[in-house]
Image (tube, rainbow, N blue to C red):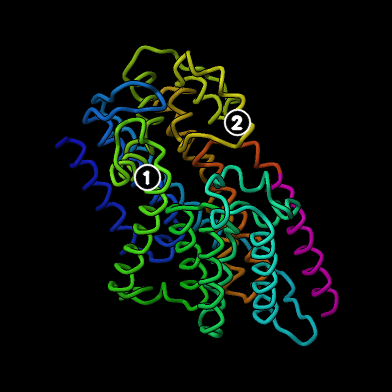
Amino acid sequence: MIFNIFVLVFASLILIQLYRRSTLLFVCFLPFTVQYSWMFLSILFIENGTYVSEQDRYGSFVYANFFLLLFLIVSLVSFTSFFRLFDTSLSFNFPKIKLLRLKESGILLYLAFFVMFLAMTNLLLSPSTYTNSEVSKFTFWNTAQLSFLKPILGNTIGFFPFILGILFRKHRVKTILLSIVYLVYLVGIDQKFTAFLFGLIAFMVSHVIVNKLYKNDNFLVFKKRYLIILASLLFGLVWFKYNNKNPYKHLGFSPVESIAYRAFGLQGHLFWGTAERYIIGDAENSWNISELPYGMHTLMFDFTPDHRKQYLEEAWQRGVSWTNGYPAILNRAFPLPIALVFHFVIFGFVPLFYALLFKALNGGNYLVSVIFFQITLWLFNIYSMSYFFRLGKILAILVILSLISFIFQKLKYDSN
């Protein structure tokens, strides 16, 4: 316990140092800060003897948090190094879009209202948590009346709060109204704490960059009392949902205990499991890079007890999975030193799009910035769940945008 607390304190000091050196990079790295923080706390609980329901066994101390700390350090070095490289070496030339005399911010406002209109229309026409207690975030789209909207809206409309962050300064009242409707929507499709937290981060990223708050040494996006109120409301919402439908009641947990178990008992169990089996233990590494595209499935099969393996295929088809399959999958694939080097290289793909996002927002290319932000959401899903098969569509979008940028730059050069 003391060792793990020391690791947590050391990790916190590293992240505080990142904040002091570059608020911009700190804000951009926030999704991964949340991921690592939850994993650190989860492993602390697990190594203190917590029962891991997915693996059907109790945790033990295997120095997993120390190994995770190494991955955090490599992630930060990779992210900051590649971000600065891409920021200084890449040029961004993209046309600003106008429609009926509307500038991009005006188009974005109408787009926000249209997206929320589609989302709420689908919610009102479909079974939701407001009308059916059996609806969950895993089943909502299976019974949705306008299911063809799923490729646009996804599970949380993750790009929507990013748009609100761009609009907030010029359209404060309308943005607040849209935020309230968005929260109603998330509750209706059974989203809980994580969706709200990452929605807040999405808002912060665009709001901070557009308004250049990262240049302020005393940067604070929200006053502390607002954060306390928001955190209290989020906890109250999660408690309400768990009080109505307690997923860990069979373990004898109260709603509050179930919230704590879900928040801290399961987030890091895959990294802990791979550390025990492949770093500390004598299991052989697979040396199989082909496991990365569906790394979560590989790890679920690896750590699911034998008597439950028959249900995995059905669970995958329903979209059910565990969490934080990456960087755990690297522990299975390679010895630790090679895993860290491999991680440094492939993680450099993430700051590429944050650098492009930064340039787009600074240049007023708000519509393109929404595309880049959606890509960062996909990247976070890829690098947290180890679903690298999704890189294909990201590369395709990058090629198309690069081609448009090249054509625009050439036309601009020829006209001069």
The mark found on residue 36 in the picture is: 1
Crowd tier of the residue under label 2, counting other residues whose Cα lies within 10 Å: few below 14, some 14–19, many 20 or above: few
Instruction: Identify the residue under disc 2.
Output: 316
Question: On the image, which quarter does residue 392 sit in?
Answer: top right
Crowd tier of the residue under label 1, counting other residues whose Cα lies within 10 Å: few below 14, some 14–19, many 20 or above: many
Q: Does the magenta stretch include residue 224?
A: no
Residue 15 x, y percent position in the rendering: 31, 54
Which quarter of the figure is the C terminus placed in?
A: bottom right
Whichever of callouts 2 and 1 sits on the residue coming sooner in the sequence is 1
Whether the residues at callouts 2 and 1 have beta carbons within 8 Å, the answer is: no
Q: Which residue is drawn at 32% across and 32% down?
A: 67
Q: Is residue 401 above or below residue 180?
A: above
Residue 304 x, y percent position in the rendering: 46, 21
Q: Residue at x 65, y 41 (%)?
A: 390
Q: Is residue 395 magenta?
A: yes
The amino acid at mark 1 is Tyr
Seen as rendered, the residue at the extreme bottom is: 101
* Residue sitting nearer the eye, 129 or 348: 129
Residue 80 seen anywhere in this rendered image of the structure: no
